[in-house]
Image (spheres, helix red, strand yellow):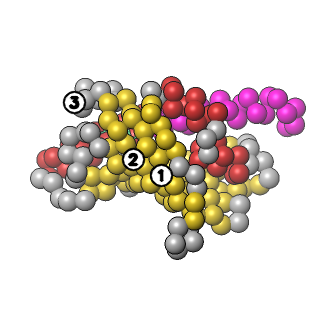
Amino acid sequence: GKLYLNRVFHFSAKHMFDLLFTDSIFMQRFMKARKITNASFAQWHDDASGTLKRRLNYTITITNPLVGKFSTATENQTLYKEGQSYLVDAEVYTHDVPYHDYFYTQNRYYIARLSKHKCRLRVYTDVKYKKQPWGLIKSFITKNSWSGLEDYFRHLESELIEEELELNQGGGEP
Ligand code: YK8
């Protein structure tokens, strides 16, 4: 796996969770900027084992010249909450890219509470294989996934920094 994002933010863990994992204005704007369309988000609900899950469907716009311009995607999220820290495990299936039946992406978002108005966000990503492709294909998939993911999480980080700035300017609190 790879660690794509690791940063302290000066707002609460709960606020971070709300930004990223509810139907927030922040996420609506971010998706618009990434040209993610046709989004349908299910509500968080308890499954049989007592963990919270939700499923998202959307269409992504792809900039990689090797791949078609669009792909539908399904994201299955599982939430583990401990105290005021959160772990969201997200499995993303891109249905219309080459070799889509071979792999999916696992993104793990850790939101750790550091204090009342401070949290740390870490995002780990792994490209997972459902069946083993030929070695050259595998490295091709992995390499192309990483570059797409890096771009996505760098953008997400900069938007979160922007959000932090706006929040802390408004409040007047140090
Ligand atoms: C989610 C992982 C791979 C995929 C893409 C496919 C390359 C195909 C390889 C060929 C285009 C929003 C990515 C980056 C599309 C975007 C996905 C996003 C960023 C050439 C063999 C979509 C997080 C996420 C997870 C997986 C990403 C795809 O919230 O390279």
Residue for point 25% across, 39% down: 97
Q: Which mark is residue 4?
A: none
- Residue 170, given in percent of the width and then of the height, sits at 82, 29
Tell me if the residue at label 1 has its CB under 8 Å from ligand 1. no
Quadrant assignment for ligand 1: top left
**With respect to residue 124, does 96 lie above or below?**
above
Amino acid at the residue labelled 1:
Arg
Cβ–Cβ under 8 Å for marks 1 and 2: yes
- Residue 82, given in percent of the width and then of the height, sits at 65, 66
> Is 26 left, or right, of 135 in this rendering?
right
Residue 91: say if magenta: no
Residue range of the region highlighted in magenta in the rendering: 152-174
Marks 1 and 2 sit apart, C-alpha to C-alpha, by: 7 Å
Tell me if the residue at label 3 has its CB under 8 Å from ligand 1. yes
Marks 3 and 2 sit apart, C-alpha to C-alpha, by: 21 Å
**With respect to residue 70, does 104 lie above or below?**
below
Residue at the disc numbered 2: 74
Residue 154: say if magenta: yes
Residue at the disc numbered 1: 55
- Residue 141, given in percent of the width and then of the height, sits at 24, 44
Amino acid at the residue labelled 3:
Leu
Quadrant that contains the N terminus: bottom left
Q: Which mark is residue 66?
A: 3
Dot 1 falls on a residue whose secondary structure is strand
Q: Nearer the viewer, mark 3 or mark 1?
A: 1
Dot 2 falls on a residue whose secondary structure is strand
First along the sequence among labels 3 and 1: 1
Residue for point 64% across, 49% down: 17
10 Å neighbourhood of mark 3: few (<14), some, or many (≥20)?
few
